[in-house]
Image (cartoon, helix red, strand yellow):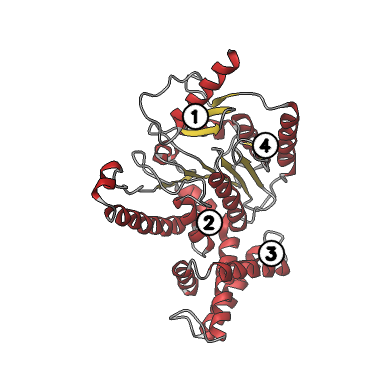
């Protein structure tokens, strides 16, 4: 009987935090505190999860004096594949952008009941443990911390934490703000991919934070079907915009433009439906992604991403030059001499930035090649974005 009641309470909390919650909200048994109602894992599962989070924390290296190091926490908070895919791939792209491959922790609510786990569970304790360890290693006067999480969000600003039948809870803007303060984390980039995530803007509107959200506080976002690889926001920001050579604010603006186009396509599809279908389904409204930029944080971010930005430019220019040399260059980018000059400048900038981070020219060359290879793989699906990246990197 008690087990059944616990399961009912868990599911009620998870549903209350989801974007599609209907009817009156459930009373919060945690009284506004950051936490979750949780049924214990089996002994074997619990031991494996403790090992995963312990190893992830132990792998983080200390910060390097004189270098703006970046620590990244990327978390999928809802147990569906789209969210774990997004958290994993976002972590990889952020790690390249911020030269932080050794300083990343990825948490996940998993891919659904019965699915094998790859990452430590995205529980409140593991989330706070990651922030606590990062806070002990990072220098608040020198380093940057990036926090990204993806899930469903509720109209009250709660971002849901769910493992179906096992764990239910939520994280709110004040929870995150309190945890970051308690961990002594100062300069930060906060990115929230969820419906109604605009609730995170006001609590993080300060000089030490850049905050980016998938939607306004009164809007839903799109693309969270379990079968997708990305949500609309994650796809636009990470998979498209952050692969280029612009800074984080430019990338957000580019992502917002892409989302506007994709949501316009959704609206056109809705309008093309028969009247009987439109009567049952409300017209999709723009998600209106939000941001707020603290000047101190933006200056820290610019230093942290300067190496990654230069590598992104060099990689995209290298791919454009290869195409130009074979006679299949992008329209407006067939001048091999101009591309070569821009590539040499970007490569020199990357080598200089890399040297200050202890990266050899060979390390930088490998990173540039990786970007060029990725550009080749994405060319057909992302030609407009690639052209935007090349245009920006050709500018003096």
Q: In this view, does 306 lie to the left or right of 154?
A: right
Q: Can residue 201 be seen in this view?
A: no
Q: In this view, does 156 lie to the left or right of 373?
A: left
* Marks 4/1: CA–CA distance: 28 Å
* Marks 3/2: CA–CA distance: 17 Å
Quick one: 4 or 159, which is closer to the camera? 4
**Residue designated by label 2:** 302
* Marks 4/3: CA–CA distance: 27 Å
Binning the other alpha carbons within 10 Å of mark 4 as few (below 14), some (14 to 19) or many (20 upward) gives: some
Tag 2 secondary structure: helix
User: Which quadrant of the figure has residue 352?
Assistant: bottom right
Binning the other alpha carbons within 10 Å of mark 3 as few (below 14), some (14 to 19) or many (20 upward) gives: some
Tag 1 secondary structure: helix
Of mark 1 and mark 2, the one earlier in the sequence is 1
**Does the residue at mark 4 contact the one at mark 1 (Cβ under 8 Å)?**
no
* Marks 3/1: CA–CA distance: 48 Å
User: Closer to us: mark 3 or mark 1?
Assistant: 1
**Residue designated by label 4:** 133
**Residue designated by label 1:** 14
Q: In the rendered image of this protein, does residue 297 appear above or below residue 367?
A: above
User: Closer to us: mark 1 or mark 2?
Assistant: 1
Q: Residue 355 carries which label?
A: 3
Identity of the residue furthest to the left in this view: 275
Q: Can residue 334 be seen in this view?
A: yes
* Marks 1/2: CA–CA distance: 38 Å
Q: In the rendered image of this protein, does residue 357 appear above or below residue 15?
A: below
């Amino acid at each position: 009987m008690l087990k059944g009641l616990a399961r009912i309470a868990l599911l009620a909390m998870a549903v209350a935090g989801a974007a599609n919650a209907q009817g009156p909200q459930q009373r919060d048994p945690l009284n506004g505190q950051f936490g979750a109602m949780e049924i214990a894992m089996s002994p074997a599962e619990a031991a494996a999860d403790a090992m995963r989070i312990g190893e992830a924390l132990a792998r983080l290296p200390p910060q390097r004096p004189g270098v703006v190091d970046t620590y990244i926490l990327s978390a999928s908070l809802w147990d569906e594949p789209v969210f774990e895919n997004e958290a994993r791939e976002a972590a990889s792209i952020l790690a390249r952008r911020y030269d932080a491959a050794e300083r990343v922790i990825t948490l996940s609510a998993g891919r659904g009941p019965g699915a094998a786990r790859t990452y430590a569970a995205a529980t409140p304790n593991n989330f706070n443990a990651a922030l606590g360890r990062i806070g002990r290693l990072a220098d608040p006067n020198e380093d940057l911390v990036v926090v990204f999480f993806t899930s469903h969000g509720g109209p009250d600003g709660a971002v849901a934490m769910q493992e179906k039948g096992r764990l239910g809870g939520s994280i709110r803007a004040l929870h995150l703000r309190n945890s970051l303060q308690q961990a002594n984390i100062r300069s930060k980039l906060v990115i929230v991919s969820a419906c109604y995530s605009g609730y995170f803007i006001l609590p993080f509107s300060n000089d030490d934070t850049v905050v980016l959200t998938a939607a306004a506080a009164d809007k839903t976002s799109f693309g969270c079907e379990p079968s997708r690889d990305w949500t609309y926001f994650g796809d636009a920001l990470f998979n498209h915009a952050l692969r280029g050579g612009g800074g984080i604010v430019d990338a957000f603006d580019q992502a917002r433009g892409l989302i506007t186009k994709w949501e316009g396509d959704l609206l056109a599809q809705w309008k093309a439906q028969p009247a009987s279908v439109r009567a049952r389904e409300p017209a999709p409204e723009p998600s209106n992604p939000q941001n707020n930029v603290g000047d101190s944080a933006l200056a820290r971010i610019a230093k942290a991403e300067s190496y990654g930005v230069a590598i992104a430019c060099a990689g995209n220019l290298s791919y454009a030059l290869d195409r130009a040399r074979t006679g299949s260059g992008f329209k407006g980018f067939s001048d091999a001499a101009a591309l070569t000059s821009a590539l040499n400048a970007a490569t020199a900038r990357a080598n200089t930035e890399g040297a200050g981070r202890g990266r050899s020219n060979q390390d930088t060359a490998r990173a540039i090649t990786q970007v060029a290879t990725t550009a080749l793989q994405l060319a057909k699906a992302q030609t407009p974005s690639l052209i935007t990246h090349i245009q920006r990197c050709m500018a003096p």
